[in-house]
Amino acid sequence: MDPVIEITSLAHGGDGVGRLEGQVCFVPMALPGDTVRVQIEQTSSRFLRASIGEIVTPSPHRVSAPCTNHGRCGACLWGHFAYPAQAEWKQRIVHENLARIAGADIEVGWVENPDLRWGYRTRAEFHGDGEHFGFYAPNTHTVVDTASHPTCHPRLNETLAGLHDLRIKGEVTVTVNPEGEEVLIWTSFAQRRLKQRFPQAECGQDRNKHRAYFIFDKAPVVNGTFSQASLVLNRLLVKTVHGMLGEPVSVLDLYCGNGNLSHSLPGKVEVVGIDHSGFAVQMARKVSERDYREGDEDHMLRLLRKGSWDTVVLDPPRSGAKAIMPGLAKSRPRAIVYVSCDPATLARDLKTLATEGWQVKQCTAIDLFPQTPHVETVCRLERA
């Protein structure tokens, strides 16, 4: 008979964690407080992976998710995880990663908008296989047919409905203005049916020197470039970062993108931003008087060496900023504000900064991705 285990915690990535004969066992979709009968899917000398065969005793935090594809698509893996427990575990995962990897045992604050735990997404990456269109199933390239999703803003669901019957093959990224009419659609390859229904759609094969964009909160949102999954929840991030920056004289904004974190700083603050995305930087420079530049990590390191910066803020991709950490650690700003969507790579980079005396003085987790295991983290560091 399949074994029964008690789920006692959650791993980075969202899997439930229990023990089977003393060995750690990861169980997707399981929650702390669940007792589950499991089917072992993977064994190794260090851990087991299993799937739920039966929920023997449900966690007190387990609820019914409003998503009809819940458990099959990857867009709301924690849709069955009630608040406030979901929030508490996100804080705990951030704290455990920082303490275990970086040695930074610090209280983790929390910021959220309880009114936007559903219907918050203004940007999503959808996939089509010619027959189905929607989100991928967790950890696969299997497309789960999705006509609408409860995490998506109504404007995004409207566009998803218009895309659903086009028999698209490939990836389509949609970004909508939640307070306007604009819709940005981006694909890697040209799609005739897509262009016929959405003439404004653009693709990576287009040789245009300019991209479609719209302005939200005075920042440009540029097609085919990064923006937060929710433009409305992004306001929480900007407010938190500005609070940690305090009143700087000058700011070096690394991985600045469209200037999201620095364009709205007071005019008296000198801002230089740099990012590898030329389209985002070009538009940021067009709509703002700030000094935004296109460049890679080598350019960032040169600016760190050459300039005298009051504060450095960085918001790197999920993989972190490993390439610039040694140079940043040796630089001499008064403070560093690090924004991350991955607690593990954040902790890895903070460990490097600690070798040169940098200490985490403040840490806040922000719920930019409700109903998922993802969490945004902002840390302020100062020298010991």
Image (cartoon, rainbow, N blue to C red):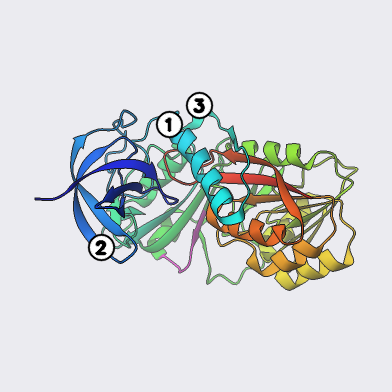
The spot of residue 310 in percent (x, y) is: 87, 51
Residue highlighted by disc 1? 85
Q: CA distance from mark 1 to mark 3?
A: 16 Å
Residue highlighted by disc 2? 42
Q: Is residue 79 above or below residue 101?
A: above
User: Looking at the image, can residue 204 be seen?
Assistant: yes
Foreground residue among 71 and 294: 71
Residue highlighted by disc 3? 115
| Membership of 189 in magenta stretch | yes
Quadrant of res 118? top left
The spot of residue 265 in percent (x, y) is: 80, 42
SS class, disc 2: strand
Amino acid type assigned to the residue bearing label 1 in the image: Ala
The spot of residue 96 in percent (x, y) is: 52, 46
SS class, disc 1: helix
SS class, disc 3: helix
> Which numbered circle lies on residue 281?
none
Residue depicted at 45% across the width and 28% down the height: 84
Q: CA distance from mark 2 to mark 3?
A: 39 Å
Q: Which residues are magenta?
A: 185-191
Is label 2 or label 3 in front?
2
Foreground residue among 203 and 264: 264
Quadrant of res 230? top right
- In-image side of 4 versus 149 (left or right): left
Residue depicted at 57% across the width and 49% down the height: 99
Q: Is residue 202 above or below residue 175?
A: below
Foreground residue among 205 and 22: 22
Residue depicted at 38% across the width and 37% down the height: 150
| Membership of 340 in magenta stretch | no
Q: Are marks 2 and 3 in contact (CB under 8 Å)?
A: no
Going from N to C along the chain, the mark reached first, 1 or 2, is 2
